[in-house]
Image (cartoon, rainbow, N blue to C red):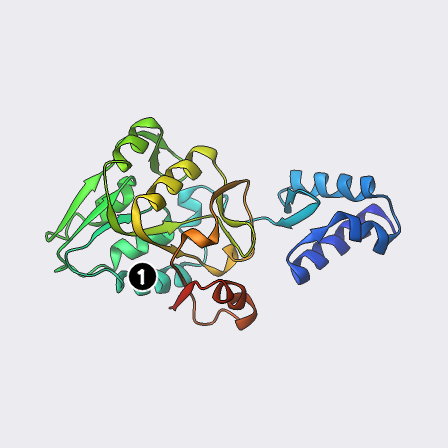
């Protein structure tokens, strides 16, 4: 089998199985593990997958800049944002993450809702300007332009002084075994701190992020309470999360 054919086989198998194991593949394809690892390394450089110990996982497509991501699957984001907004109760203190799906959550909060929203995202804060009953608290820090959020020591310190009822998390990747992950180390640290500072964490996940992995883990699945996803998500995709006791809110 030519290298090109082998890589296409690997991509097809990754889509079907959700993971690749180098040792198994070397037996199946009758090539050395070094050959498989070289293939995976080259494919990872092309952004086709994420290498992990012993093999590979699907790579998240959510790596484009904020302005590009706003136009990706907009209908899904609107539906998920609308469903997530219904989970906020009057009087609650809520962390809202950055990201385009969380922005839809902010847009769909009732204008007469009395609550407190704490965010490190200027975009989220501006989306709530006309919500006169919502107290908006902005966390400081260095602007991470890719996601348009604050990161760094100042952001981390401010988070540590808050105890929120809910944290709505946006991530690049949601995987049954790899957990929640994202593409930037500092952003992962901030998301983890927000999760630890909230009584419950609810993840907003569009379909292209499910069963994918990114380089930097935020938390394991055991650290979250629920995931908001589309009602059209197949039972096969939903089952691994349900088995781990995670509530699923279907939009």
Tell me which residue sits at (28%, 31%) in the image: 157
Tell whether 50 sits left or right of 162. Answer: right
Front-most of residues 247 and 71: 247
| The quadrant where residue 152 appears | top left
Disc 1: which residue = 84
Tell whether 187 sits left or right of 210. Answer: left
Does residue 28 sit above or below 187 in this rendering?
below
Front-most of residues 117 and 46: 117
Quarter of the image with the C terminus is bottom left
Tell me which residue sits at (33%, 46%) in the image: 97
Tell me which residue sits at (12%, 56%) in the image: 114
Instruction: Report x, y in % for residue 204.
Output: 39, 56
Does residue 76 sit above or below 34 in this rendering?
below
Tell whether 88 sits left or right of 178. Answer: left
Q: Helix, strand, or loop for circle 1?
A: helix
Front-most of residues 172 and 64: 172
Instruction: Report x, y in % for residue 172.
Output: 48, 48
Other-residue count near label 1 (Cα within 10 Å), few / some / many at <14 / 14–19 / ≥20: many
Instruction: Report x, y in % for residue 113.
Output: 14, 59
């Amino acid at each position: 089998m030519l290298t090109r054919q082998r890589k296409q086989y690997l991509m097809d198998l990754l889509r079907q199985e959700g993971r690749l194991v180098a040792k198994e593949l070397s037996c199946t394809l009758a090539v050395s593990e070094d050959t498989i690892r070289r293939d995976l390394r080259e494919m990872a450089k092309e952004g086709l997958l994420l290498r992990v110990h012993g093999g590979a996982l699907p790579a998240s497509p959510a790596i484009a800049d904020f302005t590009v991501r706003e136009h990706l699957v907009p209908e899904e984001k609107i539906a998920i944002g609308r469903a997530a907004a219904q989970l906020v109760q009057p009087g609650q203190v809520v962390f809202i993450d950055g990201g385009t799906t969380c922005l839809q959550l902010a847009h769909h909060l009732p204008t007469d809702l009395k609550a407190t929203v704490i965010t490190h995202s200027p975009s989220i804060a501006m989306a709530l300007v006309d919500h006169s009953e919502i107290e908006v608290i902005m966390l400081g820090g260095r602007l991470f332009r890719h996601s348009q959020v604050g990161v760094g020591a100042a952001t981390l310190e401010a988070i540590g002084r808050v105890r929120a009822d809910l944290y709505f998390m946006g991530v690049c990747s949601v995987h049954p075994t790899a957990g929640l992950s994202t593409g930037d180390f500092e952003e992962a640290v901030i998301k983890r701190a927000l999760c630890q500072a909230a009584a419950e964490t609810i993840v907003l996940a569009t379909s292209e992020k499910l069963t994918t992995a990114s380089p930097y883990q935020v938390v394991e699945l055991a650290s979250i309470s629920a995931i908001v996803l589309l009602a059209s998500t197949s039972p096969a995709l939903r089952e691994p999360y349900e088995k781990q006791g995670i509530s699923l809110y279907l939009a």
